[in-house]
Amino acid sequence: MQFTTTPTSELPGIRETLRATFKAGTPQPIEWRRHQLHQLARMVQENAELFVQAIAQDVGKPKVETYFAEIGPIVQRCLLNAEKLEEWTSPVNLVVPDWQKPWSPTIYKGGKGTVLIIAPWNYPMILSLQPLVGAIAAGCCAVIKPSEIAPHYSTLLSELAPKYLESSAFRVVLGGVPETTKLLELQWDHIFYTGNSRVARIIARAAAQHLTPLTLELGGKCPVIIDPAYDLKIAARRTLWGKAQNCGQVCVAPDYVLIPRQSQDAFISALKEAYAEFFPAGSLSSESISRIVSPEHHARIMDLLERTQGQVVFGGASSFQDLRIELTVVRDVSPTDSLMEGEIFGPILAVVPVDTVQQAIELVRDSKYPLVLYAFTESDTLKSEIVKGTLSGNVVFNDTFQQLAVNELPLGGVGESGYGRQVLKYTFDEFSYERASIDMPKQAEPFLTVRYPPYTEENFGV
Ligand code: NAD
């Protein structure tokens, strides 16, 4: 498609307009924010079918997945934010020792200012609009830079946003590296970036020039630890379903499975059964699974598959023309295999046999901290060992992907998987600052004289 980018010469002016709106106090009134949140929900709801089509054109995402993971959550979270505005923005009176109570220690909440949201292509709607929801709720103005790799969605968003949102406060900028590079030269009050950790380093360097605070929502390489005592059929179904979402192109996708060697055969059989049930005619041309986003990503994933020393159990077929890759399971993958080099971000599940579950925990502990650690076990002892013995953004027991449905849970990484948190109040907090305050009463003066010079031993009673 013809993807028209925003001229870079316009970008400083866009930022100036937004800054002027923030300085004029336009986003301050709660009613104004609530209206913008309702308008955003309206935009998504009234144009849901257009968004479904655009996202299908970009990444071949099935309609069910777009409703389930993008449209539904965004509309719901706009409304929940709108409901919570008073509660979240109210000044907080603190519990302090009695002698400090007259000082009225208080925390005031305010929007950070004019912020920049840089989003990726894989869940183009939720990952661009969820930060926007938090920015609106916090009282910020925002530029949204959706991904050029999802041009249909990004263009549609840029056309619809001005019809629903206040244009002097919220603007969509279209473009790729040159436009984002120009945006990053400008000063922002917060940058919220979702994407890969290589580009995150570019963003962090640019932010450092202006001491701009950052949220970095980065990549996955999410392991799955399997306790052989768990029901392997259920573990296989839930793992394969999580892997199939968006054809594995999800930051929280199960990336590789760590399973004690003696249970690998049984787990592989269960994966085969689940695959036959989910995709009776195979997954290569199934309408129940997305395609690969671009020729570059197709080539990257196929290269991993060609270089693996593991054994392909099922899948492995591909069509470059249709950007399709079959859902694929590879067994007997070693920790040094091509599939373990980085985040797979595609429809390949690597099964890595280990000696014991404890060895699996050690492998995770020694790896870069993942975004999510999944584990299938009913043992409370093992759950506790996993929680205490590893570090990851989230830790999820006995399912995959479904944690994202719990609005109240924060999503975010640690170490290589990023920093900062999102979803509802957590996103609001990213875009807010907390201003500490006291209000000293006049009547306190007699008690305060003790602090004034000249300092004498008498004053301090020493
Ligand atoms: P992408 O290629 O769309 O890039 C993301 C954004 O970065 C885009 O808006 C793009 O224009 C911009 N960008 C790319 N190169 C740039 C550069 N050189 N300078 C400045 N900006 C640049 O998306 P992606 O990075 O391929 O996204 C996939 C990655 O994102 C995966 O690693 C995935 O795990 C991660 N991700 C994380 C989360 C999370 O919540 N933690 C969610 C989704 C995706």
Image (cartoon, grey):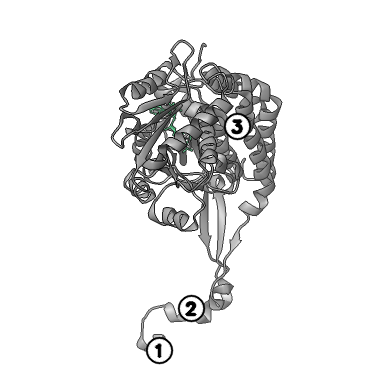
In-front residue for pair 152/446: 152
Q: Which mark sits nearer the N-terminus, 3 or 1?
A: 3
Q: Give the Cα separation between the discs numbered 1 and 2.
A: 14 Å
Counting from the top left corner in percent of width and height, residue 174 is at 50, 22
Counting from the top left corner in percent of width and height, residue 266 is at 46, 37
Residue beneath disc 3? 70
Which quadrant: the C terminus? bottom left
Is 22 positioned to the left or the right of 370 in the image? right
Residue beneath disc 2? 448
Q: Element under label 1?
A: loop
Callout 1 crowding tier (Cα within 10 Å): few <14, some 14–19, many ≥20: few
Specify the amino acid type for callout 1. Gly
Q: Which mark sits nearer the N-terminus, 3 or 2?
A: 3
Figure check: 33 above or below 7: below
Residue beneath disc 1? 461
Which of labels 1 and 2 is toward the front?
1
- How many numbered discs, if any? 3
Figure check: 391 above or below 119: below
In-front residue for pair 79/302: 302
Q: Element under label 3?
A: helix
Q: Element under label 2?
A: helix
Q: Which mark sits nearer the N-terminus, 1 or 2?
A: 2
Which of labels 3 and 1 is toward the front?
3
Counting from the top left corner in percent of width and height, residue 217 is at 45, 39
The answer to whether mark 3 and mark 1 are in CB contact below 8 A is: no
Q: Give the Cα separation between the discs numbered 3 and 1.
A: 65 Å
Is 72 positioned to the left or the right of 125 in the image? right
Q: Give the Cα separation between the discs numbered 3 and 2.
A: 57 Å
